[in-house]
Image: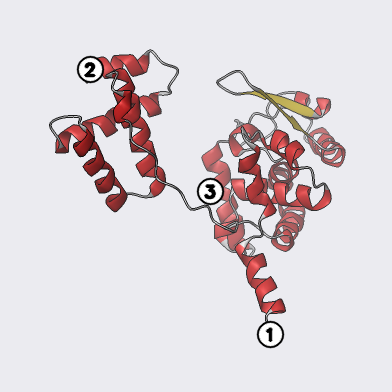
């Protein structure tokens, strides 16, 4: 097992992946004394009975990696199929987004800008906190993934002009733009927590007010105005266009409204 751990650490896997793979193999050996076809089959059945499909596939991926390490690739397990939902869940509606945005514009301009940037750029919250004044002036920020892949996040002209006026009013001409009350760069947890408080304050369902919800809103709004899913995939930073296709689906609320309207028999 220690040799396997050393093998994993020499790869490009993150520490979390190394730990999860090591855990899965250890879990297997806690139940079975040898890595053979029948034991692998029984382990997969046990996983399916006790875990969600995504977790099952993560464990299987770990076991298959271990089998590669042992040079026993012929014993590899097949993944379980994950039923893709036919709708989007917990996406803030255009009406709630507009209401929240308008309330924040009156009550708290700094948080108004956070919500505006999330919804108008499609940035992940981990990317949002990297925005600097210099990026606003340029009109975009280049984000590099661990694999060195470049993703350019554009700041639309209208948002850029709003942001420059906002920054000018607080006399900031450089550095990170989203700060906490201590003047330090805000954390992703800080953003998530405060958004929930605003949801409660403005009587909006807290389940739809979280950072990634605005990224979903960006994608939905983009497709309603520009039906170029390949371009959207690039803007979102998706590895596969199949990931982006979920935004062609309606939200569960939209589905319910459509069913209520259409079906009268």
Q: Position of residue 177 (x, y in %)?
A: 70, 32
Q: Residue at x 43, y 22 (%)?
A: 13
Q: Nearer the viewer, mark 2 or mark 1?
A: 1
Is residue 234 left or right of 79 when viewed as pictured? Answer: right
Q: Which residue is mark 3?
A: 193
Where does residue 237 sit, x and y in percent of width and height?
66, 33
Say if residue 20 shows up in the picture.
no
- Disc 3 vs disc 2: Cβ atoms closer than 8 Å? no
Mark 3, mark 2: which one is toward the viewer? 2
Q: Who is closer to the viewer here, 254 or 48?
A: 48
Instruction: Name the residue beneath numbered marker 2.
Output: 2
Q: Quadrant of residue 99?
A: bottom right
Q: Which residue is mark 1?
A: 264
**What colour scheme does the image use?**
secondary structure
Residue 110, position as x, y percentages in the image: 71, 43
**Quadrant assignment for the C terminus:** bottom right
Query: How far across and how far down the image is residue 171, in percent?
Result: 79, 30
Q: Residue at x 25, y 41 (%)?
A: 41
Mark 3: which secondary structure? helix
- Residue that lies at the very extreme toward the front in this rendered image: 74
């Amino acid at each position: 097992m220690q040799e396997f751990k050393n093998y994993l650490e020499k790869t490009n896997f993150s520490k979390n992946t190394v730990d999860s793979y090591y855990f899965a193999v250890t879990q297997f050996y806690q139940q079975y004394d040898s890595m053979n076809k029948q034991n692998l089959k029984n382990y997969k059945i046990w996983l399916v009975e006790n875990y969600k499909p995504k977790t099952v596939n993560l464990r299987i991926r770990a076991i298959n990696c271990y089998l590669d390490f042992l040079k026993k690739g012929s014993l590899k397990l097949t993944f379980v199929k994950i039923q893709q939902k036919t709708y989007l869940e917990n996406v803030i509606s255009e009406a709630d987004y507009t209401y929240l945005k308008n309330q924040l514009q009156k009550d708290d301009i700094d948080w108004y800008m956070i919500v505006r940037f999330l919804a108008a750029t499609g940035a992940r919250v981990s990317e949002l906190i990297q925005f600097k004044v210099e990026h606003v002036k340029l009109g975009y920020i280049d984000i590099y993934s661990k694999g060195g892949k470049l993703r350019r996040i554009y700041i639309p002209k209208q948002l850029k002009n709003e942001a420059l006026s906002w920054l000018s009013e607080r006399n900031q001409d450089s550095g990170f733009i989203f700060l906490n009350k201590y003047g330090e760069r805000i954390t992703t947890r800080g953003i998530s927590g405060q958004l929930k408080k605003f949801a409660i304050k403005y009587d909006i369902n807290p389940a739809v007010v979280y950072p990634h919800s605005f990224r979903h809103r960006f994608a939905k709004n983009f497709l309603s105005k520009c039906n170029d899913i390949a371009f959207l995939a690039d803007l979102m930073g998706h590895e596969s266009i199949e990931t982006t296709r979920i935004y062609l689906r309606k939200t569960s609320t939209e589905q319910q409204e459509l069913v209520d309207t259409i079906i009268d028999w």
